[in-house]
Image: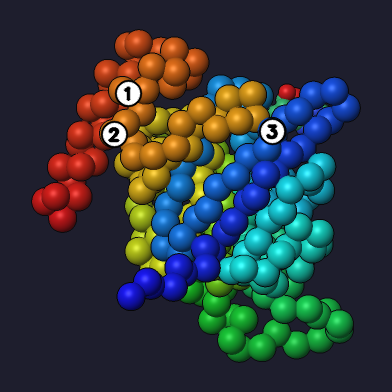
Amino acid sequence: MTQARETPLLSCRNVTKAFGSLTAVNDLSFELAAGEVLGIGGPNGAGKTTLFEMISGQTGVTSGTIALEGRDITTLSPVGRCHAGLARVFQLNTGFDSLTVRENVLVAAYYGRAPRRMPGLRVPSEVGDRVQDALGRVGLEASADRPAATLPVIDRKLLMIAGALAMSPKLLLLDEPVGGLTQREIDRVADVVRQVAAGGVTVVLIEHVMRFLVQLSNRVMILHHGKKLYEGDASGLSRDRDVVEVYLGHGAGKEVARMAADRAEVRHVG
Ligand SMILES: Nc1ncnc2c1ncn2[C@@H]1O[C@H](COP(=O)(O)OP(=O)(O)OP(=O)(O)O)[C@@H](O)[C@H]1O
């Protein structure tokens, strides 16, 4: 008996984005099953952020289609995509400086989940609960009443993740969540992402920090000139000559092989 194939959580079909004569993303297709963590890497200018822009609706596709749980969202507004279950954390800070940490997350929780016609009248207790839960998941409860502007860089990054989590997303897009952080801080963000994924949220992350990418991703996709250079297990990265040549470099290739082996070891022990 043939088994019905499950609808992918996210499906990108022949997606292309051209800026004039420059094709930033070129006929890219991939699928994501619910519960996966997909890590996207690649050289600067490979088209990674442009891909996120198209998935989250900040920019339109030149051609191709994007579907969330089988529903075509290619032309849906960014806010419509939020309400459909898609949340994106940007590479650069997007918080409101003058609002407190709690208020920042409240804005996301209030507007990110359902259409609001009369803002500011009454915040349902269910929204307050989601805010509290999100703050707890990233470990920012103690800073809840601080203005966002006073937070250190790591906490601002965690605040953006909390905002996304407060929308109870099905799919979370993280654009370079650990860029510029120390190893200790990277580990803290990795713990948060691991917990989020363990809670059933599907994650796509863009990251140049290979340790983070390798440790967290079930599958890795490397882009180059807007096309897929590699898609597969992290352990295959260092064996792929094109990936080593174009992205990792020969020295780093060995290091990535070690990281992938460590990950396999952790999985085995766990
Ligand atoms: N709005 C735009 N207008 C014109 N060109 C753009 C625009 N946005 C991106 N590009 C170009 O598209 C290409 C892909 O850029 P993109 O930011 O997606 O790459 P990336 O892989 O995310 O790079 P990085 O790792 O440096 O963040 C680059 O050549 C970039 O200059």
Quadrant (top left/top right/bottom left/bottom right) for the N terminus: bottom left
**Horizontal side, residue 208 vs residue 263: left or right:** right
Q: Secondary structure at mark 1?
A: helix
Query: Pointer 1: residues within 10 angstroms few (<14), some, or many (20+)?
Result: many
Query: Pointer 3: residues within 10 angstroms few (<14), some, or many (20+)?
Result: many
- The residue positioned 63% from the left and 51% from the top of the image is 12
**Horizontal side, residue 133 vs residue 72: left or right:** left
**For marks 3 and 2 on the same chain, the one whose residue lies earlier in the sequence:** 3
* Pointers 2 and 1 in contact (C-beta within 8 Å): yes
Q: Can you say whether 117 is above or below 230 in the image?
A: below
Q: Type of residue at label 2?
A: Ser
Residue at image mark 1: 238
Residue at image mark 3: 26
Quadrant of ligand 1: it is top right
Q: How is the image coloured?
A: rainbow
* Pointers 3 and 2 in contact (C-beta within 8 Å): no
Q: At which x and y percent is residue 152? A: 54, 43
The quadrant where residue 99 appears: bottom right
